[in-house]
Amino acid sequence: MSEEPENRLPPGQYVPRGRPVIHYGRVPRFNPDTWIFQIFGATASGKEHRLSWPEFERLPKRTVFADFHCVTRFSIMGNEWCGVSPATLLELAPPAPGVRHVMVWGEYGYSANMRLSDFVADDTLFALELDENRITPERGFPLRLVVPRLYAWKSVKWVRALEYLTEDRRGFWEERGYHNLADPWREQRYSYQEEPGDGPL
């Protein structure tokens, strides 16, 4: 990338030493024999789709270079993520015509909602690797969503499911006072900052 890091920093962010790790709750154990990825909600077929771990691993991969912005104000610059594009999953299990939002589910019932337009952006990825290595357990192994254009709480760790929504619904942190949209360039950190139309009615 040709831009200097300071030109890529959203307002109120700083570049820390190292790579801090923040997560809610304990790190789950991974069992490849029982792990299932579900796609449900408003699917075009009306049916739930399920992928085993070997099936998910065989999906086509792509690489994304992107910065990572935490709502706690640190940004990790220049990450190389490798994984599965949301477009691959949408092709495998198409959403119904009325779908405008998604909810991504992780272990322990953690969830994050987002607009379909953010979910299908070119730099969004279901990541399996970070900088040519498997993602570590504390960073979301075996699978995490990466949504570089939004604050990092939208980048769900330990992903297990994708739900198609015809109406927006708040996820885990959104229900606890975080902004529904989470655009770091607009500093959309907290729900009290929301304007009409930013969140569910």
Image (cartoon, grey):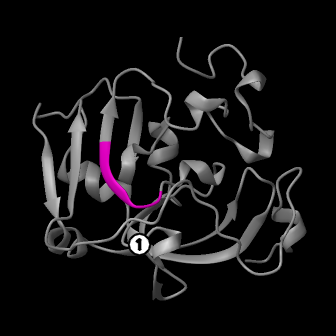
**From the viewer's perspective, is residue 71 above or below residue 31?**
above
Which quadrant is the N terminus positioned in?
bottom right
Residue 42 place in picture, x, y as percent: 23, 29
Q: Is residue 191 above or below residue 162?
A: above
Q: Main secondary structure of the magenta part?
A: strand
Residue at x-position 20% and y-position 70%: 53
Give the left or right position of residue 71, taking residue 88 as reference: right
Against 61, residue 72 (above or below) is above
Q: Position of residue 194 (x, y in %)?
A: 72, 22
Identify which residue is drawn at 71% across, 56% down: 70
200 within the magenta span: no
Residue positioned 45% across, 24% down in the render: 168
Q: Is residue 15 left or right of residue 163?
A: right
Image coordinates of residue 179 in percent, x first then y, are 67, 32
Q: Is residue 117 left or right of residue 28?
A: right
Label count reads 1
The amino acid at mark 1 is Phe
- Which residues lie in the magenta part? 157-162
Q: Indicate left or right for 197 with 130 as reference.
A: right
Q: Position of residue 5 (x, y in %)?
A: 84, 72
Q: Can you tell which quarter of the image residue 189 is in?
A: top right
